[in-house]
Amino acid sequence: MKIVILGASRGCGLALLKRLVFDDAAASQHTIHLLLRNPSSFSQHLCTLGMSLPSSVHLHQADALSISSLSCAFQSIRKHGGKVDLIVSSLGAVPVFEWKSGLKPRLQAGLERICADGTKNLLDVMRDSTAPTPALIVVSSNGIGQESLERLPWILKFFYHHLLTHPHADKHEMEELLHRAYGLHSDDFNPSAKSSSERSAAPFDPSKLLIVRPSLLTSGARTGKYRISEAGSTLDSAWTISREDVGHFIAESINESAGEAGSNALNRSGAYVVSY
Ligand SMILES: NC(=O)c1ccc[n+]([C@@H]2O[C@H](COP(=O)([O-])OP(=O)(O)OC[C@H]3O[C@@H](n4cnc5c(N)ncnc54)[C@H](OP(=O)(O)O)[C@@H]3O)[C@@H](O)[C@H]2O)c1
C-alpha cells in the first residue's frame, strides 16, 4: 500500500510508523510518505532514538494548515509514482495552561483549530484531486459527542467537559466535517443524514473512512490488548489507552485491509472507540 501519514512526528502517529516500519512483517508491503512541518528535526529526533528509516519511507515538508502546502506535497508524492491508497491523520497540538484561561487549557497558539482546519484542507485536497480517492483514517477522541460523554466514568466526564472544552470543540468540528463529507449519520455530528438520498449526496464513500476515538492517552507501552467498540458506538468504563496501542490498532486495521484485493477499501470503517 502507498500510505501518507500526517502527525507522525510523535504520539499515536509515531507509534503507528514504528509499528508499520520496524515491527511488522507486513512492512515490506508499504511505501510510506510522511508529511511533516519540520522533516530535519524529525530525522534528528529519530537519530536520538537510535532509529533509521528504510528507503520505503519518504519525508515531505508540509503544513496541514496551508492548503497550498498540502497540495504541493501530494503532487510530489504522486510524481513519485502511482496513486495514494491511504491517508492517516493524527494531527493535534499540545494543550497550554495559562492563568488567564483558568482551568481550561488552550491549544498552542496558531494550532487552536488544527483538527478542524487541517482536516478541512485535507478533504479539499482529496476533493480537488483527479486521482482515485484514498481511504482515510483519522484520530479523534472519545467523549466528544453527547452520548459518549454521558457514558464516561464520572471523573473523566468532569475532566472532559470542563477542562478539555477547547480541544474538544476543535475535534467536534472535525467530526462534523468528516460525517458530512462521508454521509455518515450520527445524532451528535450529522443528525440530518438519515435518509439514503442524503447520505448518497456526500462526496466520499463511507466505507473508506475510519475514525479512531481513543480514551485518555498515556505514554505507556504497547500491549496489543484493548477493547474496541461497535461501529458508531462507545464503550463503558473507557479510561485510558497508550499512544503505542492506538498505533497498534491503526496498524492492525491497515494490515487487515492491505490483505484485501483492491487495496484502498478498509476492512473496518466507521467510528470506533479504543480503550483498555
Ligand atoms: N491527550 C489525550 O488524552 C487524547 C485523548 C484522545 C485523543 N487525543 C487526540 O489524539 C490526537 C493524537 O494525539 P497525540 O498525543 O498522539 O499526538 P500529538 O502529540 O498531539 O501530535 C500531533 C501531531 O500533529 C502534528 N502537527 C501539528 N500541527 C501540524 C501542522 N500544522 N501540519 C502538520 N502536522 C502538524 C505534530 O507535528 P509537529 O511535530 O510539527 O508539532 C504532531 O506530529 C490528537 O488530536 C489528540 O488531541 C488526545
Image (cartoon, rainbow, N blue to C red):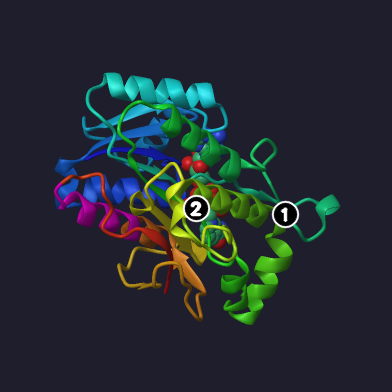
Q: Position of residue 173 (x, y in %)?
A: 62, 50
The mark lying in front, picked from 2 and 1, is 2
**Horizontally, is 52 left or right of 217 in the view?**
left
The residues colored magenta run: 249-261
- Three-letter amino acid code at disc 2? Glu
Q: Is residue 235 magenta?
A: no
Estimate the x, y position of residue 46 in percent, counting from the top left: 37, 38
Q: Residue furthest right?
A: 100
Which residue is painted at 53% across and 26% down in the image?
Answer: 67
Residue 248 to residue 53: above or below:
below
Q: Secondary structure at mark 2?
A: helix
- Give residue 105's mark: 1
| Quarter in which the C terminus is drawn | bottom left
Q: Position of residue 102 (x, y in %)?
A: 82, 58
Q: Is residue 255 magenta?
A: yes
Q: Which residue is mark 2?
A: 198
